[in-house]
Amino acid sequence: MTPLQELAATLRAALGADRIVDDRQELRTYECDGLAHYKVTPGLVVLPRDAEECALTVRACTALGVPFVARGSGTGLSGGALPHAEGVLVVTSRMREIVEIAPADERAVVEPGVINLQVTKAATPHGYYYAPDPSSQQICSIGGNVAENSGGAHCLKYGFTTNHVLGAQIVTPDGALVELGGAAPDTPGYDLLGAFVGSEGTLGIATRVTVRLTRLPESVRTLLAAFATTDEAGAATSAIIAAGVVPAAIEMMDALAIEAAEAAVACGYPAGAGAVLIVELDGPAAEVAAQFGEVRELCERNGAFELRIAADEAERALFWKGRKSAFAAVGRISPDYIVQDGVIPRTALPEVLHRIGEVAAAHGVRVANVFHAGDGNLHPLVLFDAATEGEAERAETVSGAIIDLCIEYGGSITGEHGVGMDKAKYMPRMFTGDDLETMHLLRCAFDPAGLANPGKVFPTPRLCGEVPRQHSATDAPAPAEIF
Amino acid sequence: MVDATWGTHDAPRDVLGPVAGTPAFDEHRPPRTDLISDCVHCGFCLTTCPTYALWGEEMDSPRGRIYLMKTGLDGEPMSDSMVQHYDRCLGCMACVTACPSGVRYDRLIEDTRAQVERRFERPPRQRALRAAIFALFPYPRRLRLLRGPLRAYQASGLQQLVARSALLTRLGPTLATLESLAPRLSAVPRPPRLVPAAGSRRAVVGVLTGCVQSAFFPDVNSATIRILAAEGCDVVVPPAQGCCGALSVHNGREAEAQRFARRLIDTFDRAGVDHVVVNAAGCGSSMKEYADLLRDDPAYADRAAAFAAKVRDLSEILVELGPAAKRHPLPLTVAYHDACHLGHAQGVRAQPRALLAGIPGLTVKEIADPEICCGSAGIWNVLNPEPAAELGARKARTVLDTGAELLVTANPGCLMQVAASVRRLGGDIALAHTAAVLDASIRNLGTDQLLARRS
Amino acid sequence: MRWSKAGSDDHVGGVPARYLAAPASTEEAAEALRAAAADELAVVVRGGGTKLHWGLPPRRLDLILDTHRLTGVVEHAAGDLITVVRAGTRLSELDFGTQQLALESPLPGATVGGALAANTSGPRRLLYGTARDLVIGMTVVRTDGTVTRSGGKVVKNVAGYDLGKLFTGSYGTLGLITECAFRLHPVPPARAVALCEAEPAEVGRLLAAVRAEQVVPSAVEVDRTESGPVSLAVLLEGTAEGVRERAARLEKVLGGTTGDLPPWWGTYPWPPDGVGMKLTARLSRVPDLLDTPPGTTVRGSAGTGVLYAHVTGDVGGAVERLRATAVRAGGHAVVLTAPGEVRRAVDMWGPVPGLELMRRVKDRFDPQHRFAPGRFVGGI
């Protein structure tokens, strides 16, 4: 019996047959997440119902030295939930109970498989919502959000998942259930919760998450501004930030992205726009009213040829619909595409956009740009047709060149999609060997056997060993010599 | 797709090994590769899929089913497990609405089902159950004979079939629900062949009377005809229309569906109408797809396309025409339920709401999670009683949460599914087809009759 | 690089150091720590010295690494709303014009590094978050002298582990923070403070009423001396018109007045040699923390559930009682600072979940347990 077969038998006996997937074809439906060009058929899929079952699964894996990968809704865009061929895929999609909505504590307790938007739906009747809103919020799970430290359009003002997670119960890679953080802030000891959020499943699996609920804003005003060029839209963005306004969101789409969104959801953006900005302000009505006028004026002054102000929730939803469906909508104008997720200092935006354009032109590929302009998080969509000889390779080249640009301008290789499998190879371009080794120290503290989501985040497999001896620094003079 | 770039890692080992057996699909209308490749695997469909809502499994989601189709095209055989996951699809098309990439899942699953019906040998019990269903439901006359379970069981030589397939245990609850909701048979006269427009004529329309609708809810057909006439339509009701083929097409019985479709096209062509009006969501959606169903039939392809273009849901045609007849007040709070084959398959959501909102005194409440199917789904609830009951219970809870007095929907299947589910929860709500509500308003009948038909 | 023998003031919680090092750059700091590693010296990092008496005294101490020369703003990219600052810089010396680092220290003279290492926070944490929310990148010299960076200079970044959060609040037990990148916020043009006094029993209702108003306060602070009424102060920041309108609404809700910041605002309630505690609770249970033992003053962020207490009299009993209350309220009670005899008598940290995992982290980052040994939770 292989370790996997042994594991399957153990788990089937312990959890019941309906928790286990080992049918060949069924396994294949799990072979990729939202980044579909990486495919690995998992050795086994387990669908635990609760934290105990999840912990039992991990313990069984550890006992046999079998690697495991956690997966929520499978919507990640970095291959973070790419299965391991000889490992177990632990899918949290059946752990979807909203345990508690506590408006008086401004928090909610949910299982990891709960969908992001469901938290908001459950909190809204109480006057609250869950602020992080990745574009996939109607389907992505809270567990996945925690693993990836998901952002979203509104994180410019409200921050990321890490700023909204107050506590988590996790299964550590040795199968123990551990509480990190809690109901109140500033838990004594190391901020392991802060380190866990965004660790992409390499430090364990979240089995219960306490999230902060945010009071619904009294007023939300949304404006759609059309510009002839992305330069103008970028200048308007800079002007808004320079004026000391912190909008809830500033989103930009270029002409190609607009074309795709129109094809998909008929969002009705102004015709002939080279770029649109969606600017949203929220907060107390008096504040929003005062700042909204300023934002309007700044858009006009920077060349907006059409301004639309959402008259009601329906119109606001339509503005956002085009933006939020943009990635998948690109499927309408191109057979294949790569979504990038680089970050640059916002002020470098116009320059970087031009250079992306140059790189794309040089390689004969089209790039559609959708991005969170407020915080410099670019989502260039590199379009190609895999059926055309060499196009996929050219698209990959352009995609890599964009990452290099982000690093060159002092930014990041990923703003919200995570490193996963896709960007592990770029990590050494952003971090030194020492930086990565330091991160690995944390990994080893949690997962000395390296069984939790191996092969992700870090560019090369590393072993932990026993608690390492510090290398002695023979070249440094001892204090006695210095005096 | 791009080949995976494994960075400095090794490419993963192939643990599955080569495929064995006959590939799942043959050359006759397999699920189309180009439609499959439209799926970018984003997962936006998952939460709207009723089976994913129930079980949280990838292979019982639209994305997973499309993936299974792809593996089938890649050579994986049509295994029991593959077929099971196709079978579990309710065909509600919520995923089509949710999909930002415009994947035609409706086309994909229909083509897949046709292949399954042709190429997959089901176990004998399943075969018998399906045979019994398709010997019964697409035939309004047989359904009428079934009215009253006892009478049904004794009549018409169906008895043997019923006993052999355990049909009664499966169909019993469905038929009992239908019967309890239906008005007494003698109370509703057969519709006349032609009803002239009240006032000046604005259109000539034909009306599809349907199978379940005509057998169990003939009053809905009467209401439909009266409303159309009141709104200025000459209404033609061809006799012996037969079935539209919806159930057949949704269950992969391609040839049977095509036979029904040709007959219906012939019938309405002879009637010479501007529009064919349908008051059952499932029928309307499949009639609008006739062009596709008969695309390979040279004698019918063009006629099917012309026919499909004439098909309108009742609410669509009424909104297109605009109100002519006076609406009288109905002081009611109603919850409107989107039948999947109206909302998702036909995109008709605004029209029924607009018509209801146009009735003085009537308030329309929205039901939470409107995109999720109630679990009726044609004959799905007969084939899958337990998960259907679970979906029904979820829907019933959200319906009851609205606090409405009356549930309005435009599909007989939904009506009986929600009715049975509300009853199981110990709740109580009145039920009506959109046509009945409009009819009551136009004829100034008040609310009593509408509130009489209860779960 | 300056090394010297430690002077009479160079002790931590009464434990004298042997050496003192004051690097002026990350490189110098790395050099010093490599040397310390070679000689297996026990190290405590010192910034402004304002919290050196917090926590427990180190089990052993050889070298105090002082950051007073590791100062200055490395970068202020106004258009990108970020700054990079050296760890020894005093928070009070930072001036970004129309922008601000929304990190306040209750203790004058505190450095950036010290505020991070001890995870202190001020009233406006309600709106802006704490150090962990404001840090976007960090340079740390590990215990063996290795220089390492995490995060970056852009606000949005999920590349690699967020080690900045791990080092924040780690009391110098994992390494030396030398440089930090922060996100900045615009300085709001106007502010107003809504004030009222209330009986302790009323506070819960008033806090809920403030939350219900959707006025997005920057801070909601309470102060209760011994047995008097509770003072409540709500800070509103924004445009002149907006602030006026919001303050007027709160005035009505609280039945109070609009004025300026009260004198106790943003300070700890204990005197230099007093017993100071940090109490936390879930929001709805904040009023429980105001029901204090005799001789106790409580103050702090009612809007986030983080209060501070000055305990006098029967300290042992009071700590126990406050801890029991806090734990019941879903929080914790930590004795931040106390005279030596109290420290030895009470459990400073109380129960800490996940301690085993924390020890494993410590073992990896500081296998010889040379950095601030014993000062942190569970004897870490």
Image (spheres, coloured by chain):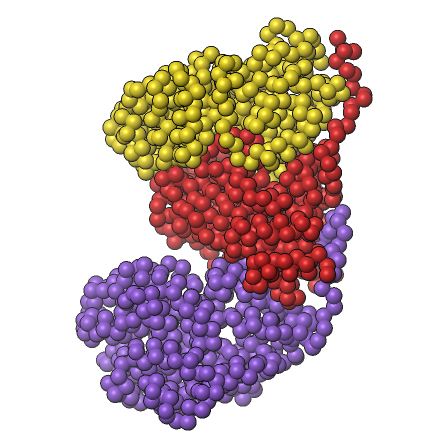
Q: Is residue C60 left or right of residue B147?
A: right
- Residue that sits furthest to the right in the current view: A474
Up-down relation of residue B411 to residue B237 (above or below)? above
- Residue that sits furthest to the bottom in the current view: B157
Residue A111 locus on image (x, y percent): 49, 49
Residue C309's quadrant in the figure?
Answer: top left
Please state, as top left, top right, bottom left or bottom right, where the N terminus of chain B lies in the image. bottom right
Q: Can residue B304 be seen at all in this image of the molecule?
A: no
Q: Which chain is yellow?
A: C
Please name whichever residue, A248 or B158, is drawn nearer the observer in this view of the structure: B158
Looking at the image, how many numbered discs can be counted on the residues?
A: 0
Please name whichever residue, B343 or C105, is drawn nearer the observer in this view of the structure: C105
Residue A440 locus on image (x, y percent): 69, 37
Q: The red chain is which one?
A: A
Residue drawn at the location 59% of the way across and 14% of the way down: C12
Residue B226 locus on image (x, y percent): 26, 80
Residue A103's quadrant in the figure?
Answer: top left
Residue B345 locus on image (x, y percent): 45, 70
Up-down relation of residue A1 to residue A396 (above or below)? below
Up-down relation of residue B307 to residue A265 (above or below)? below
Colour chain B is painted in: purple
Q: Is residue B188 left or right of residue B260?
A: left
Residue drawn at the location 53% of the way across and 38% of the way down: A180
Residue C221's quadrant in the figure?
Answer: top left
